[in-house]
Amino acid sequence: MTESLQVVCPECDAINRLPAHRLAERPRCGACKAALFTAAPVALGEARFRHHLRHSGIPLLVDFWASWCGPCRMMAPAFEQAAQALEPRMRLVKVSTEEAPSLAAELGIRSIPTLALFAGGREVARQAGAMPARTIIAWAESQAPA
């Protein structure tokens, strides 16, 4: 029997069920027909983040950042490069701590940028500080559940 995974659409937030072996076949959302993977981070506010976290069958790599943060802005292109390398094995997400301060407080985000890896709805790893793309990729791959 083929393992099925839930993938949340980055456009309409519909929950799609896909066989795991089809993740790399450029799947589209059953509801809105948008690509489920775009090789780019998805910007999410608090409510959408919670929805993705609750329903995603793939790990979420989250960049907690703020627009006024110089290191955050410097790391943004590296995070985009990492999305190209890590999708569809994981979804890369950006959450602004300015737009979701209660979420940042709840999760104990004390410095930015902070990367947090979530799997199965739970945080499994965290790393603070700006990193180049190759380091983001290596760190995420080493921390992701098998």
Image: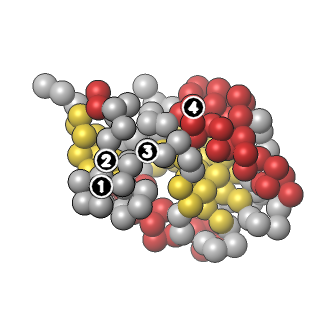
Q: Residue at x 38, y 49 (%)?
A: 35
Which label belongs to residue 108? none
Report the amino acid beneath label 2. Answer: Arg
Q: Secondary structure at mark 4?
A: helix
1 or 2: tag closer to the N-terminus: 2
Disc 4 residue type? Answer: Ala
Label 2 SS? loop
Quadrant for residue 54, please give it.
bottom left
Neighbourhood count class around disc 1 (C-alpha, 10 Å): few under 14, some 14–19, many 20 upward: few
Whole-Å distance between the Cαs marked 1 and 4?
Answer: 23 Å
- The residue that mark 1 highlights is 33
Q: Helix, strand, or loop for circle 3? A: loop
Q: Residue at x 45, y 33 (%)?
A: 89
Give the CA separation, mark 1 to mark 2. 5 Å
Horizontal and vertical percent position of residue 18: 25, 40
Q: Please name the residue that numbered disc 3 is placed on.
A: 37
Q: Is residue 79 above or below residue 71?
A: above
Q: Going 72% across and 41% down the picture, which residue do you hit?
A: 78
Q: Is residue 108 left or right of residue 55?
A: right
- Tag 1 and tag 2, C-beta contact below 8 Å: yes
Tell me the mark number nearer the camera, choosing from 1 and 4: 1
Which numbered disc flags the more N-terminal residue, 2 or 3? 2
Residue position for label 2: 28
Q: Earlier in the sequence, mark 1 or mark 4?
A: 1
Residue density around tag 3, few if under 14, some if 14–19, many if 20 or more, within 10 Å: many
- Label 4 sits on residue: 85
Q: What is the spatial separation of the Cα atoms under label 3 and label 1, in whole angstroms?
A: 12 Å
Question: Is residue 85 visible from the viewing direction of this image?
Answer: yes
Q: Quadrant of the C terminus?
A: top left
